Amino acid sequence: MIARKRADIAWRDIAFGLRVCLWPTPPRPDGFCDEESLVCLSVRSGFDMLWSALAWPAGSEVLVSAITIPDIPRIIRHHELVPVPVDLDIATLTVDADALRRAITPRTKAILVAHLYGSRMAMEPVLAVAREHGLLVIEDCAQAFTGQDFKGHPESDVRMFSFGPIKTATAFGGGVLFVRDRALRAKMATLQATYPQQGRREFFRRVLMFSLFMLALAPAPYAAVIFFFRLIGRNHDEIVTGAGRSFGGPDFFQKIRRQPSLPLRLLLSRRLRTYPADRVQQRAAAGREVCAALPQGMVLGCRAAQHTFWLFPIVSHAPEALMQRLWHGGFDAARGSTSLCAVDPPPDRPETLPSASQAALANVLYLPVYAAMKSVDLQRLGRLVSRFETENSGGAEMAPGRVPFTASR
Ligand SMILES: Cc1ncc(COP(=O)(O)O)c(C=O)c1O
């Protein structure tokens, strides 16, 4: 069975992570962080600190590109602010400047956009709208890290990168926020300094746990893991999706309001310093190969100007049945139904319902597509999906077609 995802980390990085839990080394510059950056326990930790530091009046609105993780609107609401979704163009995974303008009210104070699944949307139109209305721009790059070459748009007020367990260049945690405004950054840093620290022992356990998870994702053990869950009547899709998640269970805000431990900082710094420049390009090439074999328009973001396929989401006519078919074919496709969501509109603004995003997520299926997969498997995956969709859509618009992706750099 080809697992849905490979953790993007080498065993020598893991060995380093474990070693610095016991014998920390002096910190070294990593070439990514700079005088504008703040290293946090996670993006969610930094995002929560941002709202605490801004302390905006209750009821202030934040326009949010409609697809994100559920914790993002949760954190906004926790600060008594109102997330207002702005629907996405599903083919490009971008928000339209006019749609942003239409969603603005006198209460709007910020725009938050997320680059999704490894794609990148152009920030200039977003920044132009923000300038017209004096709004803060937050650029969520949690799914868009490609290496030292990309730190978000320099004019975005806040840019956020995540290094959680399933992210590119993972350090099994950690988030880097770039904050342009010096006073705001200082406020956030001061707040973070009051938080308790993640324990070294806790980070050691975390590295060990995710290393086991990594081992389990190799083809032979993974097939055994799935067999075991089926035997005990459990859905492995939910369990594996859940295993890659941080901060589950109760006391969410207590869990995110902590400082990163020194070993986490050191591992993150090493990942940033040594991350191979061509790694993401290989993943993008695998993604383009499968795209070319699939019916046109089936891939979320198929017309994105830049895409590196951190995840490979497709919209299917029958996602559940296709997932079963792919499992039988040896590919661990995932519904991942709880990891990304369409943001709900505020009760008094039903017109902002993001229907295109909702419809896409209702039928989404994530395919295993990554650089370590052989071309023969990528091709077979493309054929299996194409054949299934042709059989299940009455044959309409199912001719395989090439999608005009460009390289990410
Ligand atoms: C779009 C997006 N934003 C924010 C986050 C949160 O990142 P972290 O896990 O570092 O809190 C994620 C994590 O999956 C994400 O996908």
Image (cartoon, grey):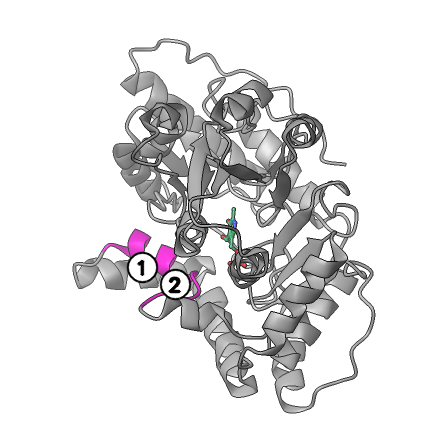
Task: Look at the numbered discs 1 and 2 and tell me whether their residues touch, using CB distance below 8 Å.
Answer: yes
Give x and y (percent) for residue 255: 44, 72
Which label sits on residue 239? Answer: 1
Q: Is residue 14 visible?
A: no
| Residue 57 appears left or right of 21 | left
Which residue occupies the foreground of this view, 186 or 27?
A: 186
| Residue 322 appears left or right of 268 | left
Q: Which quadrant of the view contains residue 303?
A: top right
Q: Which quadrant of the view contains residue 389?
A: top left
Q: Secondary structure at mark 1?
A: helix
Q: Is residue 124 above or below residue 64?
A: above
> Which residue position is annotated with label 2?
243
Q: Secondary structure at mark 2?
A: helix
Q: Residue at x 30, y 15 (%)?
A: 393
Q: Residue at x 52, y 87 (%)?
A: 201
Instruction: Kindly identify the amino acid type of the residue bearing the numbered disc 1.
Output: Ile
